[in-house]
Each structure stands twice: as C-alpha cells, then as structure tokens.
Image (tube, rainbow, N blue to C red):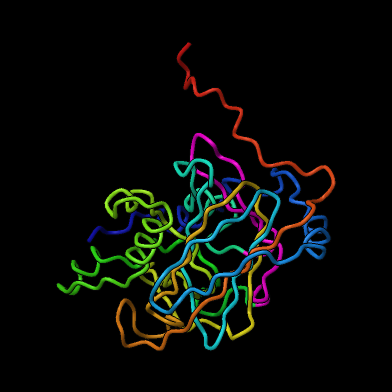
Amino acid sequence: MTDAPPDADARRAIPPVIVYPPEALPDPRIGDRLAAFDTYEKTAEVLVPPRDARCFRVPAGGAFRITSVEAPQVGDLNLWNADDISERFFSGKTRAIHGTHVTTGDRLWTVLPHMRPMATIIEDTLDWYGFDEFGGGIHDVIGTRCDPYTGRLLSGDDYHYCCHSNLTRALAAELDMPLAEAERHVHDVLNVFMCTGFTRDTGQYFMKASPVRPGDQITFFAELPLLGALSACPGGDCGADHSSDVARCAPLLVEVFEGTPPEGWAPSERSPYPGTHGVV
C-alpha cells in the first residue's frame, strides 16, 4: 500500500549479520558423547500412540532416542528440567542460536534466567535432507504446536487430540496435577521429523509431507535430568490434513539409555548472569 522510496533496492541490498554466531558457543564434543552412548544400555521405552502423547524421564548424562515406526509420522516434543519444571525448553532462543531447524551437533536451550543446554542432538538419520527447493527443512523450532484454540479460531470446531491437548493430558497424568495447571507448563515445541518452512513470497509457515520413514531416528544426550513429553501429531506425516482424524497416523517410539557419561562431563550450569539488570 506504500510506494517504494527511490533507494528501496539499496536498502534491500544491505547484507545480513548473523546475530548469534554459533562458533562462539562451547564445543558440544559430539564425538565424546557418541562414544559414550555406544556403551549405554536401554533402560526404558515408551510407545506413543497415534493422536496421543506420553511422558518419559531421562537422567542427566543419559540419552533418549525417538524413532518412527510403522509409517511416516511427526511428533511434538516438550522438555522440562525434571527437578524443576519451571525450567523448560526455549524454542525461540534455540531458533535464534541454531536456526529454524536443528540437527546433529545442535543443542536445545532452556528458558531465562537459566539459559543453558538441556539436550544435545548426537544422531539424526535425516540430517542428509538439508533444505529443499521450497525452503523446507526437518525438525523445526518455528511451529508452536497444533492447539484447540487456534482450531476454534480458524474452523469454529473443537478438536481435542491436537498436540497441545495431548501434551497437556500427558503431563497432567505424569505429575498428577489438574489439566488447567498442567496446561500452563506446555510450551512451544521441537517438531520432530516435521518438514516445514516459510513461503518465499508471503513468508507464511508451511508444512509438507515429511521424508521420515520407519526406522528413522533422532537421538539426544541429556545435559540435565529431563522430563519429556512427546505427542504423535494428528497430522501424521503432515502432508495434507492437520488437527483432524483424517490423516493416517502411526505411533512413535521413545527409548531411554543410561551409562557412564564422557570423561569430564558434568550437567550444564545455569547462566552466571547475576540478574541485576543494571540495578545495584
């Protein structure tokens, strides 16, 4: 609606600056974590039913793996510090540090004022995908999760098996708390296996059929004691339908592994910033 100024092209041509250069971060020592993981033993597993969610726990220094089984399926992941669920996954800062999609070597960060790694991705069988011609990538931290409030806004209908509701029910059951209390702790997710991006003409969030196939997996090293919740999204592979009973859906497998962490490893420490915010 506004005419472009004479210097419009020059303004657009200004080169970008990376806000949070990842090379400034501590080395995640993926090789050390992988070597340790190779000696770990599986101690638990949870099969997440289609259009539902389940919780799981991982000790600090342990690991967990999410695997697609039976058919292509995406999942919505929430993570909390198992000792203090007010400390949870911070998708926005993870996105700012690592980009819109995460893969091997990237870390999931916790909310302020903690601001520390809670999990490190040590394996990803879809890391070959990169970004496609549409700008789509895998394992995004840009989607918030399907929820019944947006569903009501856009369609006028209520759907109770969207990821937000699934995660709420799972957390309420795990911690034996009322749904309303549990819901306050459900947060923006890591969209595991989901293929997403932004359209280049309008900048709209899009999804497309995930390239995930049965047997594909992503593995995380726990930098803190973790409480996790994973929802097997009602969109299935998210190639067409979303938040409905139309799409073909499949379970997701979560496996927990424990063993001796790498030499010199210790749980990540809370940010040393004193929280004074300039006030003495």
Query: Is 154 placed left or right of 14 in the picture?
Result: left
Residue at the spot x=83%, y=61% of the render? 35
Position in image of residue 275 (x %, y %): 50, 24
Position in image of residue 244 (x %, y %): 29, 81
Q: Quadrant of the N terminus?
A: bottom left
Residue at the spot x=50%, y=62% of the render? 190
Residue 242, located in which quarter of the rendered image?
bottom left
Q: Is residue 120 magenta?
A: yes
Residue at the spot x=39%, y=69% of the render? 205
Residue at the spot x=59%, y=86% of the render? 213
Q: What is the magenta range?
A: 103-128
Q: Is residue 110 magenta?
A: yes
Query: Is 71 placed left or right of 266 in the picture?
Result: left
Along the viewing direction, whichever of 173 and 140 lies nearer the viewer: 173
Position in image of residue 248 (x %, y %): 41, 89
Along the viewing direction, whichever of 38 and 20 lies nearer the viewer: 38
Along the viewing direction, whichever of 100 and 159 lies nearer the viewer: 159
